[in-house]
Image: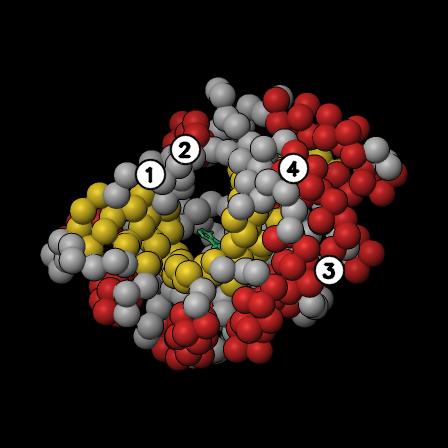
Amino acid sequence: MDRPLRDLRISVTDKCNFRCNYCMPAEIFGPDHPFLPKNEVLTFEEIERLVGIFANLGVRKIRLTGGEPLLRKNLSKLIKNLVNIKGITDIGLTTNGIFLPKQAHHLYAAGLRRLNISLDALNDDIFKRLNGRGVSSKTVLKAIEMAKDIGFDVKINMVVQKGVNDQEIIPMAKYFYENDITLRFIEFMDVGNTNGWNLEKVITKREIFHLLSSSFELEEVEPAYFGEVAKRYKYKEKNAEVGFIPSVSESFCSSCTRARISADGNLYTCLFASKGYDLKKILRNEKDDDKIKDEIISIWNHRKDRYSDERMSRPKEKKQKIEMSYIGG
Ligand code: SAM
């Protein structure tokens, strides 16, 4: 498989203020959970050095994520430096939005333009239960509005689980249609081993599309570039789009151009990996960037992962996988 390396997702922290049941269930990520000690987490200088090396290798897009990336202190300082790295043309951030009111202006001033904000329901009872912290959807909606007013390009991520928030598909679609904001439905994925995933809880792109078709006229949009993950549709006579991330029902391993770095500097070539490559150790011991670059090339060229393609052919296998909050979504 010929899969160029183009995108890099960087988790800047493994901590989160939410306890979404499909990502960091509270029973597992309790008060005693051993999060990474500070000295294990990559410093901003280390992240910047790595991004420089990856840019040299052809990476153009960076996404900062977590955990909740806005829990990382002074994140706008990192962004300011990443924006200036030669070759990097696009920086995005995925967040639950709670800390945006305090930080959005700084992030924008630092050069960030793209935000993916996660919101799984408008209905407060459902959303409060889902985020595990009793936070109202109104708090996130206000953050979204503010981000739009500042000038950010905002997209909304909704993870859909059957019997949990599928009744929110149409209300969410209507709300964001009316507000001209792109909404993306993410199929519930079997990331990690703690979220109780099974296939029956997945609502597929096809099912959601079918539901939406009863309320909206949708036109397919051509992919903007090789390896684009979202399958996009435009609402007729609107700018806003609706998108799907069909990782379960229409896997896209063959065009996957993404590498991921966990908060403690492990490199992963697949979201469903069991094992990473310790880049932090190399970074902290090696002064020559070219040697680190060679190491990354070798890892990428030996990449054989295609977990989502193979998922259905080995449903009973119990593979140990890293957690989403650690590797970054
Ligand atoms: N804390 C940030 C947030 O809430 O957006 C960033 C990290 S979160 C892990 C990134 C994205 O991954 C979110 O949109 C979240 O809904 C999604 N996600 C987490 N677990 C998932 C799962 N099991 N299946 C599908 N999407 C998932």
Image point 62% across, 21% down: which residue? Answer: 302
Q: Foreground mark, 3 or 2?
A: 2
- Report the residue marked by disc 4: 54
Q: Which residue is mark 2?
A: 226
Q: Earlier in the sequence, mark 4 or mark 1?
A: 4
- Tell which of 151 and 11 is nearer to you: 151
**Marks 1/3: CA distance?**
41 Å
Sequence-first disc among 4 and 3:
3
Q: Residues within 10 Å of mark 1 (few under 14, many from 20)?
A: few
Give yes or no for contact between labels 2 and 1 (Cβ–Cβ under 8 Å). Answer: yes
Label 3: few (<14), some (14–19) or many (≥20) C-alpha neighbours in 10 Å: few
- Earlier residue among tags 2 and 4: 4
**Rendering coords of residue 213 (x, y %):** 14, 53
Residue 34, which numbered label?
A: 3
Whether residues under marks 4 and 1 lie with C-beta atoms below 8 angstroms apart, the answer is no
* Residue 43 image offset from top left, x and y in percent: 77, 55
The image's colour scheme reads: secondary structure
**Mark 1 highlights which residue?**
223
